[in-house]
Amino acid sequence: NVHASVRSHEKQQGLRDKGFVNVYGDALHGGAQEVAAKSDVIFLGVKPQVIRPVLHALAPHLDPERHLVVSIAAGITLSDLEESLGQGVRVVRVMPNTPSLVGCGASAYALGSYANDADCELVRTLLSSVGLAIKVQEKMISGVTGVSGSGPAYVYMAIEAMADGGVKCGLPRETALMLAAQTVKGAADMVLNN
Protein backbone atom coordinates (compact mmCIF):
# COMPACT_ATOMS: atom_id res chain seq x y z
CA ASN A 1 0.00 0.00 0.00
CA VAL A 2 1.11 3.53 -0.75
CA HIS A 3 0.57 6.23 1.86
CA ALA A 4 1.24 9.88 1.07
CA SER A 5 1.40 13.17 2.90
CA VAL A 6 0.92 16.21 0.71
CA ARG A 7 0.65 19.86 1.51
CA SER A 8 -2.24 21.15 -0.57
CA HIS A 9 -5.81 19.99 -0.84
CA GLU A 10 -5.52 20.12 -4.64
CA LYS A 11 -2.62 17.64 -4.61
CA GLN A 12 -4.44 15.43 -2.13
CA GLN A 13 -7.45 15.33 -4.42
CA GLY A 14 -5.24 14.77 -7.46
CA LEU A 15 -3.74 11.67 -5.85
CA ARG A 16 -7.16 10.41 -4.80
CA ASP A 17 -8.38 10.91 -8.37
CA LYS A 18 -5.50 8.64 -9.49
CA GLY A 19 -6.66 5.90 -7.14
CA PHE A 20 -4.54 6.57 -4.06
CA VAL A 21 -6.75 6.24 -1.02
CA ASN A 22 -4.23 6.67 1.80
CA VAL A 23 -3.52 10.38 1.35
CA TYR A 24 -2.90 12.51 4.44
CA GLY A 25 -2.46 16.22 4.97
CA ASP A 26 0.64 18.32 5.39
CA ALA A 27 3.60 16.50 6.96
CA LEU A 28 3.98 19.36 9.43
CA HIS A 29 0.43 18.97 10.67
CA GLY A 30 0.11 15.25 11.31
CA GLY A 31 0.81 13.82 7.86
CA ALA A 32 4.33 12.68 8.77
CA GLN A 33 3.04 10.83 11.82
CA GLU A 34 0.31 9.11 9.76
CA VAL A 35 2.74 8.00 7.07
CA ALA A 36 5.29 6.72 9.62
CA ALA A 37 2.61 4.78 11.48
CA LYS A 38 1.50 2.98 8.34
CA SER A 39 4.71 2.61 6.29
CA ASP A 40 8.01 0.76 6.42
CA VAL A 41 9.66 2.64 3.55
CA ILE A 42 9.24 6.40 3.39
CA PHE A 43 10.16 8.36 0.25
CA LEU A 44 10.88 12.05 0.75
CA GLY A 45 9.98 13.81 -2.48
CA VAL A 46 9.96 17.41 -1.32
CA LYS A 47 11.84 20.45 -2.51
CA PRO A 48 15.19 20.89 -0.72
CA GLN A 49 14.18 24.26 0.70
CA VAL A 50 11.30 22.72 2.67
CA ILE A 51 12.80 19.39 3.70
CA ARG A 52 14.20 20.40 7.10
CA PRO A 53 10.79 21.01 8.75
CA VAL A 54 9.51 17.77 7.20
CA LEU A 55 12.48 15.84 8.63
CA HIS A 56 11.87 17.34 12.07
CA ALA A 57 8.17 16.44 11.88
CA LEU A 58 9.00 12.88 10.82
CA ALA A 59 11.92 12.12 13.17
CA PRO A 60 9.98 11.45 16.41
CA HIS A 61 7.85 8.84 14.65
CA LEU A 62 10.64 6.73 13.17
CA ASP A 63 11.78 3.35 14.43
CA PRO A 64 15.31 2.54 13.17
CA GLU A 65 14.50 -1.18 13.13
CA ARG A 66 11.39 -0.68 11.02
CA HIS A 67 11.76 2.39 8.83
CA LEU A 68 13.89 3.04 5.77
CA VAL A 69 13.89 6.66 4.59
CA VAL A 70 14.67 7.29 0.92
CA SER A 71 15.31 10.88 -0.11
CA ILE A 72 15.10 12.28 -3.63
CA ALA A 73 15.60 15.85 -2.38
CA ALA A 74 18.45 17.35 -4.38
CA GLY A 75 21.43 18.59 -2.40
CA ILE A 76 20.37 17.03 0.90
CA THR A 77 23.26 14.83 2.01
CA LEU A 78 23.16 11.56 3.88
CA SER A 79 24.69 13.27 6.92
CA ASP A 80 21.95 15.96 6.76
CA LEU A 81 19.35 13.20 6.76
CA GLU A 82 20.98 11.14 9.51
CA GLU A 83 21.53 14.17 11.77
CA SER A 84 17.93 15.33 11.35
CA LEU A 85 16.27 11.91 11.64
CA GLY A 86 18.23 10.57 14.58
CA GLN A 87 20.63 7.85 15.64
CA GLY A 88 20.38 4.59 13.73
CA VAL A 89 17.76 5.63 11.17
CA ARG A 90 18.43 3.90 7.85
CA VAL A 91 18.58 6.34 4.94
CA VAL A 92 19.29 6.21 1.22
CA ARG A 93 19.90 9.19 -1.05
CA VAL A 94 18.64 8.89 -4.63
CA MET A 95 19.12 11.00 -7.74
CA PRO A 96 16.43 9.91 -10.21
CA ASN A 97 15.55 11.53 -13.51
CA THR A 98 12.36 12.40 -15.34
CA PRO A 99 12.45 9.51 -17.86
CA SER A 100 11.52 7.34 -14.86
CA LEU A 101 7.99 8.54 -15.60
CA VAL A 102 8.03 6.42 -18.78
CA GLY A 103 10.00 3.46 -17.40
CA CYS A 104 13.34 4.60 -18.86
CA GLY A 105 14.91 6.28 -15.86
CA ALA A 106 18.56 6.41 -14.91
CA SER A 107 18.86 6.63 -11.14
CA ALA A 108 21.81 6.43 -8.80
CA TYR A 109 21.61 5.84 -5.08
CA ALA A 110 23.95 6.03 -2.09
CA LEU A 111 23.49 4.25 1.22
CA GLY A 112 23.65 5.93 4.60
CA SER A 113 25.73 4.65 7.51
CA TYR A 114 22.99 2.45 8.93
CA ALA A 115 21.48 1.14 5.68
CA ASN A 116 22.03 -2.59 5.22
CA ASP A 117 22.22 -5.04 2.32
CA ALA A 118 18.47 -5.65 2.40
CA ASP A 119 17.84 -1.90 2.13
CA CYS A 120 20.25 -1.71 -0.80
CA GLU A 121 18.47 -4.53 -2.61
CA LEU A 122 15.02 -3.07 -1.90
CA VAL A 123 15.98 0.36 -3.27
CA ARG A 124 17.67 -1.21 -6.29
CA THR A 125 14.54 -3.26 -7.00
CA LEU A 126 12.20 -0.27 -6.63
CA LEU A 127 14.32 1.99 -8.83
CA SER A 128 14.88 -0.76 -11.40
CA SER A 129 11.12 -0.97 -11.87
CA VAL A 130 11.32 2.40 -13.66
CA GLY A 131 14.70 2.03 -15.40
CA LEU A 132 18.37 1.68 -14.60
CA ALA A 133 19.51 1.81 -10.95
CA ILE A 134 23.18 2.10 -10.01
CA LYS A 135 24.66 2.18 -6.52
CA VAL A 136 27.34 4.86 -6.11
CA GLN A 137 29.32 6.48 -3.34
CA GLU A 138 27.66 9.67 -2.16
CA LYS A 139 30.57 11.80 -3.36
CA MET A 140 29.53 10.83 -6.91
CA ILE A 141 25.94 12.12 -6.62
CA SER A 142 26.87 15.58 -7.94
CA GLY A 143 28.31 13.98 -11.06
CA VAL A 144 25.18 11.86 -11.41
CA THR A 145 23.08 15.01 -11.16
CA GLY A 146 25.02 16.56 -14.03
CA VAL A 147 24.88 13.49 -16.25
CA SER A 148 21.53 11.82 -15.74
CA GLY A 149 19.64 14.22 -13.47
CA SER A 150 20.03 17.22 -15.78
CA GLY A 151 20.84 15.22 -18.91
CA PRO A 152 17.27 14.87 -20.20
CA ALA A 153 16.99 18.65 -20.57
CA TYR A 154 20.05 18.71 -22.83
CA VAL A 155 18.74 15.79 -24.86
CA TYR A 156 15.39 17.57 -25.28
CA MET A 157 17.27 20.59 -26.61
CA ALA A 158 19.26 18.41 -29.05
CA ILE A 159 16.06 16.74 -30.28
CA GLU A 160 14.42 20.12 -30.73
CA ALA A 161 17.44 21.42 -32.66
CA MET A 162 17.46 18.33 -34.89
CA ALA A 163 13.74 18.76 -35.54
CA ASP A 164 14.24 22.45 -36.32
CA GLY A 165 16.83 21.44 -38.91
CA GLY A 166 14.36 19.02 -40.45
CA VAL A 167 11.68 21.69 -40.60
CA LYS A 168 14.11 24.07 -42.34
CA CYS A 169 14.61 21.33 -44.93
CA GLY A 170 10.87 21.13 -45.53
CA LEU A 171 9.73 18.35 -43.16
CA PRO A 172 6.50 18.84 -41.24
CA ARG A 173 7.22 19.61 -37.54
CA GLU A 174 5.59 16.37 -36.30
CA THR A 175 7.58 14.23 -38.74
CA ALA A 176 10.85 15.99 -37.94
CA LEU A 177 10.26 15.61 -34.20
CA MET A 178 9.41 11.91 -34.48
CA LEU A 179 12.50 11.25 -36.60
CA ALA A 180 14.78 13.20 -34.25
CA ALA A 181 13.44 11.53 -31.10
CA GLN A 182 13.61 8.04 -32.60
CA THR A 183 17.16 8.71 -33.80
CA VAL A 184 18.25 9.66 -30.28
CA LYS A 185 16.45 6.64 -28.82
CA GLY A 186 18.06 4.33 -31.39
CA ALA A 187 21.51 5.80 -30.82
CA ALA A 188 21.11 5.35 -27.06
CA ASP A 189 20.05 1.71 -27.58
CA MET A 190 23.14 1.14 -29.71
CA VAL A 191 25.38 2.60 -27.00
CA LEU A 192 23.75 0.49 -24.30
CA ASN A 193 23.84 -2.73 -26.34
CA ASN A 194 27.32 -2.40 -27.80
Image: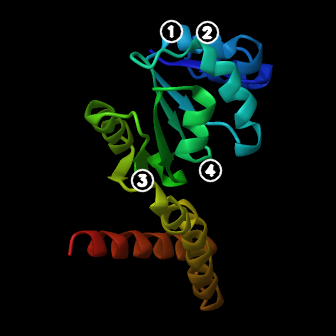
Which amino acid lies under the numbered mark 1 shown in the image of this protein? Lys
Q: Residues within 10 Å of mark 4 (few under 14, many from 20)?
A: some
Q: Along the horizontal axis of the image, is 170 left or right of 190?
A: right
Q: Is residue 68 visible?
A: yes
Residue 48 image position (x, y, % from top left): 70, 44
Q: Tags 2 and 1 in contact by the CB under 8 Å rule? A: yes
Q: CA distance from mark 4 to mark 2?
A: 24 Å
Q: CA distance from mark 4 to mark 1?
A: 26 Å
In this view of the protein, which residue sits in the foreground, 62 or 28? 62
Question: Which residue shows up at 22% across the image and 70% down it?
Answer: 193
Q: Identify residue for label 1.
A: 38
Asked where in the image residue 23 lies, by quadrant, the reply is top right
Which amino acid lies under the numbered mark 2 shown in the image of this protein? Glu
Which amino acid lies under the numbered mark 4 shown in the image of this protein? Ala
- For the N terminus, give its image quadrant: top left
Q: CA distance from mark 2 to mark 1?
A: 6 Å
Q: CA distance from mark 3 to mark 1?
A: 27 Å
